[in-house]
Amino acid sequence: MENLLEIKNLHARIGDKEILKGINLTIKPGEVHAIMGRNGSGKSTLSAVLAGNQNYTVTEGSITYLGKDLLKMSPEERSWAGIFLGFQYPVEIPGVTNVNFMKTAVNEHRKQNNLPPLSAAEYLKMMREKMAYVEMDPSFSSRGVNVGFSGGEKKRNEIFQMAMLSPRLAILDETDSGLDVDALRIVANGVNRLKREDNAFVVITHYQRLLDYIVPDIVHVLYKGKIVKTAGKELAAEVEKHGYEEFEK
Amino acid sequence: MAEFKYIPQSEIFNCSVELSGAKKFYVLDGKPMGFSAKDGVIEIPSEGDLLTQVIFVRTTPHPSSYKVRIHCPAGSSRAVILCAHTTGTERYVTEESVAIAMEENSNLSLIVMQNENGASSHHSTFDISQKSSSTVLMNIITLHGGNIANKVNCNLNEKRAEAQLSGLYLAGGEQIIDTTVNLRHNSGECTSNQLFKGILGGNARTSFKGEVYVAKDSQKTEAYQANNNLLISDTARAISDPHLVIYADDVKCSHGSTVGSLADEELFYMRSRGISESEAKLLQQQAFAGAVLEKISNTEIRERLSRLVERRLRGEDTLCAGCAKRCC
């Protein structure tokens, strides 16, 4: 099967600081990858580069997504092509309601596929259905995007947005951080419901905890901007037991 | 933000857009049509419970200077919307003075909508005088104009008077929009609240000068003042100059002022969801303007003005839905 994503020798920096120092990673449809690593290993930088955050500069290497040069695409073009980033720190947008935000996003996606915009009723039906995936109260739709949301509510909102946009490649950047066990279960169930044969997930995390719920096919350990170990799901348990030290020699 | 490019399709001035529960009046170049001016002052008619809409249209390039009066008798409740328009691309110069007299327990909801061409000059002074327990809710929405100056002098002369003043100015191109507010708490137990916001593009210049004055014996005063400006170009300049002058000691007063640009992290978040950069910026600007538009209590007018603001921000003609270009 065709590769969904192929990263070759990726180097990236923020300001003068090189953070990614030669990442190689191939993702096929249907796979769930976990990327583990300590703080500062480059996990969030990798997700930001994949989503097109212009604060990061790619200095070397390539990223091919569905046969196209991802680095030439704007953040919105990446979204239209099926890439979704679940933010570690979802952004608050006062004055823009959740419903207006997501409706605009869904309709822009439809426009790219030459589909007419959803009617208010159609949108509402879809929204209710997807909110149920993450047990989110529909009253959240009339509130400003993430404004006054608790940590757990913000993460649920990320998964809700993911459900609305139905991505081909979802990158979840520390979606488990700041979640209690119940919220973790709700978020993981949402993700598991969205798994298909033609899409893939990259789950970025410090801990094995989330991987008990979202079981990965492949686990990578990131250290100082490089993937230093790749193995099956048993690697996560190993990290949990022995820590990162043995991979950092 | 595009230039205003309205040219009327008719010589007959007749606003074709219905406004529920409203009675329309026209003032052409300072002359009231079908109602009279008393001692050279245009008295805004009161039609029972109806909303009074007065459409001020400039048609000839001669300077025009006129006086307007809005009187709210004791215990009355009035709603007035004043719309200012120019018909062509000439330079129209307008000097307008509006006196607003609020008797005891009266209530006024006043909306001022300004939409003029880029060569026009329109200076307005609003003198508001409030007696006890009167309330003024005023929104000034400046969609377009060449050189617009709005000066609001509000005097809270007796106890429990309340003034809620807000404004939104959208300035692009070479536009200059100045706002001055002098709010005087001459008596105690009064409340005032100001929220003025501006969105500036192109080479626009705006200024906000606001003073809240609390007299020596005006205890239990509550006064709040905020001015926020959003710059969407590198060459626009906003000046913000808020002041509090307080001589009483038992008061709650605050003021704040900001000049900023669109938040990058919000923009990236929206774009990462597939919202194009231009649409994301528009959403941010609408959110910014929303805080002022929300204060308009009449739903129909609020929706109409929100639409006009959106059209203005998109660079489209600022016309109401169903406008036949027959009045303004």
Image: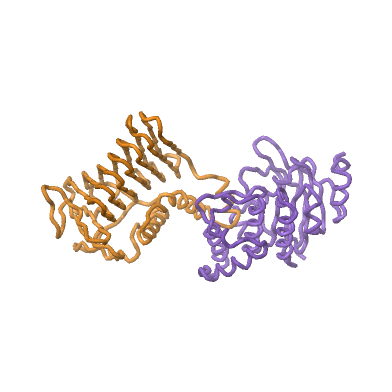
Q: Is residue A102 left or right of residue B174?
A: right
Position of residue A48 relative to residue B52, above or below, is: above
Total numbered circles: 0
Query: Is residue B17 positioned above or below A184 on the image?
Result: below
Q: Quadrant of residue B26?
A: bottom left
Instruction: Report whether residue B213 is seen.
Output: no
**Left or right of B137, for residue A151:** right
The answer to which of B105 and A220 lies nearer the viewer is B105
Residue B35, how many percent across, how many down?
Answer: 14, 58
Dividing the picture into quadrants, the one containing residue A56 is top right
Residue B302 in view, yes or no: yes
Quarter of the picture holding the C terminus of chain B? bottom left
**Colour in which chain B is drawn:** orange
Say which residue appears at 51% left-offset and 70% top-offset.
A119
Residue B109 percent coordinates (x, y):
31, 53
Near-viewer residue (A189 or A198): A189
Residue A159 falls left or right of residue B111: right
The colour applied to the residues of chain A in this rendering is: purple
Q: Residue A167's spot in the image, x, y percent? A: 66, 62
Across and down, in percent, residue B82 comes to: 27, 53
Name the image colouring: by chain
Front residue of A50 and A213: A213
